[in-house]
Amino acid sequence: MNPADVRLDVRLGRLRLVNPIMVASGTFGYAREMAGLVDMGRLGGILPKTITPDPRPGNPPPRTIETASGMLNSIGLDNDGVDSFIEKQLPYLASLGTAIVVSIAGRSEPEFIQMAARLDGLPGVAALELNISCPNVAGGVDFGTDPTMCERLVAGVRHTCSLPVLAKLTPNVTDISQIARGAEAGGADAISLINTCLGMAVDWRRRRPILGNVLGGLSGPAIKPIALGAVYRVARAVDVPLVGMGGIASIDDVMEFLVAGATAVQIGTANFYNPTVSRQILDALPAALAELGATCVADVVGTIESG
Ligand SMILES: Cc1cc2nc3c(=O)[nH]c(=O)nc-3n(C[C@H](O)[C@H](O)[C@H](O)COP(=O)(O)O)c2cc1C
């Protein structure tokens, strides 16, 4: 197969992407920060930092710390709220020529639904990702730990707006497949996994936690095996497409996620230490797919042989 002939476009339910490489929420700001480093129009999609109904100051500092093969963060959904996002960030994002998947978080079902209604039909909004998985805020995460609440929330958002809906799940549960089934039953177009893994860093000399919020979310290469395991398990539990993330930093990582069952991927922490990582991965993707004899991305998705 000639790499130039491989088709890169993918479908996540009603959402169509020109390629499967997106950047993850909270690791790309509102994209302005990355201008000049990334050819935004080439990306399959951009997930801006999660927004909430009202402005949030986030958690006390320190909010990030480097760990072995990863980082811990406890940002706590610091953002200026949905109105400010629509006025100040969305016009720029909409001009970038790629799918903007707006990540939203609320403390209750009505909050999610109000935000979905507010964003529905606005130019530049391609889809919503429901962040029901942030480990750094009180409340909210219940939607990601209880399959019935997850189903109700996804269904409520779907009935409220015409946008494709992605549900982003937390790995901090006993069985992520159960939550994924809830998201599927609620009508999610796709399921994104995983958000960060709950963790902690300790300064033993001062006998204190290092993060101001005590606990934080672990991300980066350290969590890739957890994320791959989640994708593999969830792919066996549901029929909706999956968006894999967790430690992706190279084309090999991307191919592992696709073969394990993800239709698309998001790159997160790697953006911080290699801002051009998405460009490098996009450059390498056609040849990697061709190496497996694929004519399109779907040819490799979930093709892992096991057992
Ligand atoms: C500093 C930081 C901030 C994050 N903020 C958000 C956020 O606002 N919303 C969200 O859904 N995920 C957020 N995440 C989680 C990432 O989107 C992603 O799910 C996770 O980091 C795993 O991918 P990675 O290992 O490639 O970073 C954040 C991650 C980091 C490191």
Image (cartoon, helix red, strand yellow):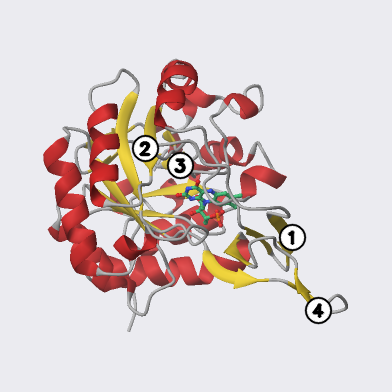
Q: Mark 3 and mark 1: span between their CA atoms? A: 22 Å
Q: Residues within 10 Å of mark 4 (few under 14, many from 20)?
A: few
| Circle 4: element type | loop
Q: Mark 3 and mark 4: span between their CA atoms? A: 33 Å
| Circle 2: element type | loop
Tell me the kind of residue under disc 4: Arg
Tell me the kind of residue under disc 3: Thr
- State the quadrant of the N terminus: top left
Q: Which residue is mark 3?
A: 50
Q: Which residue is mark 4?
A: 207
Residue placed furthest toward the bottom: 307
Q: Mark 2 and mark 3: span between their CA atoms? A: 27 Å
Q: Which dot, 4 or 1, sits closer to the camera?
A: 4
Q: Residues within 10 Å of mark 3 (few under 14, many from 20)?
A: many
Q: Is residue 106 above or below residue 31?
A: below
Q: Quadrant of residue 198?
A: bottom right
Residue drawn 25% across and 36% down?
Answer: 114
Q: Mark 4 and mark 2: span between their CA atoms? A: 51 Å
Q: Which dot, 1 or 2, sits closer to the camera?
A: 1
Q: Is residue 8 above or below residue 214?
A: above
Q: Nearer the viewer, residue 41 or 186?
A: 186
| Circle 1: element type | strand
Asked whether the residues under the numbered discs 4 and 1 touch, taking CB atoms below 8 Å apart as contact, a structural biologist would say: no
Q: Which dot, 3 or 4, sits closer to the camera?
A: 4
Tell me the kind of residue under disc 2: Leu
Tell me the kind of residue under disc 1: Glu
Q: Is tag 4's residue or tag 2's residue first in the polypeptide sequence?
A: 2
Numbered mark located on residue 8 in the image: 2
Q: Which residue is mark 1?
A: 66
| Circle 3: element type | loop
